[in-house]
Image: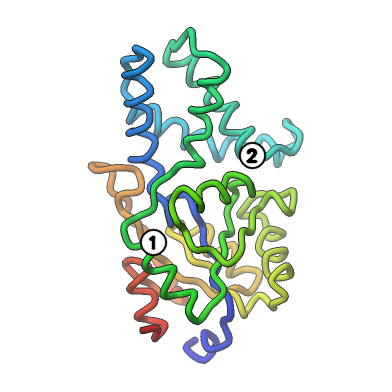
Amino acid sequence: MQNARSHVKALTFDVFGTVVDWYSSIVAEGEKFGDTHGIDIDWTQFALKWRAGYGPAMNRVRSGELPWQNIDALHRLILDSLLDEFKIEGVSEADKNHLNRVWHRLKPWPDAVSGLERLRKRYIVATLSNGNVALLTNMAKFAGLPWDCILSAELTGHYKPDPEVYQTAAALLGLSPNEVMMVATHPGDLRASQAVGFQTALVPRPLEYGPGRVQGVNAHPSDLVANDFNELADLLGIA
């Protein structure tokens, strides 16, 4: 496996949860939004339910129930249903759009920027997210994420973990799948990329769903495992 890793030329990264802390970012913005709009709800539950709606919404597209649409559009569908569920009324269209774009303004984990800077000394570093191109680009500007390239499932008309997403990413980079390493905190993402020939690195983010909801994830025997992006750089021999 070490020999196989020597062929790696690019690292592709899951973003939501792996690179950025969606939970605390959304809770903080939600609480601020609530303060300015007189909305008193449990924003931790709102954030968790918003994220929980993500997989089912993508499956509605996969099944053909919904036509293809990007993640901004799916986030808005989920948001509209949550506004009803939490009995939030009187929010303007402009405010709904601003709130929906919170996903463009997620804060990075503390190691993300410094770790990516180190990793890109040797490798191409690129997003490989279900987030749409505009979202990922705006997030990079907001959070200072030093990507070499923004790759998105949007470019394929599929969502991860569909194999087309990973295959297209490698092709767009001009690389064979075994020259790409997928970096993620979600084992399912790693397994799906591995199935098309990617190398894999697991970076657990136990606080992805917030304090008190610590997530444990199990590594696959062929995964490189690092606690954060700087440790991943260490394991890959980058000073």
Viewer-nearest of discs 1 and 2: 1
Amino acid at pointer 1: Ala
Could you say which disc has been placed on residue 146 in the image? none
Tag 2 residue:
59
Q: Residues within 10 Å of mark 2 (few under 14, many from 20)?
A: few
Residue 192 position in % (x across, y down): 59, 62
Identify the residue shown where x is 35% and y is 18%: 36
214 up-or-down from 110: above or below: above
How far across and how far down the image is residue 119, in percent?
45, 75
Percent x, y of residue 90: 48, 8
Q: How is the image coloured?
A: rainbow
User: At x 37% / y 67%, what residue is drawn?
Assistant: 114
Q: Quadrant of residue 228?
A: bottom left
With respect to residue 189, does 76 lie above or below?
above
In the figure, 137 relative to 194: above or below?
above
Which residue carries the number 1 mark? 112
| Quarter residue 211 falls in | top left
Question: Among all residues in the image, which is located at the extreme bottom?
Answer: 3
At x 58% / y 28%, what residue is drawn? 76
Write the residue at 49% across / 86% down: 1
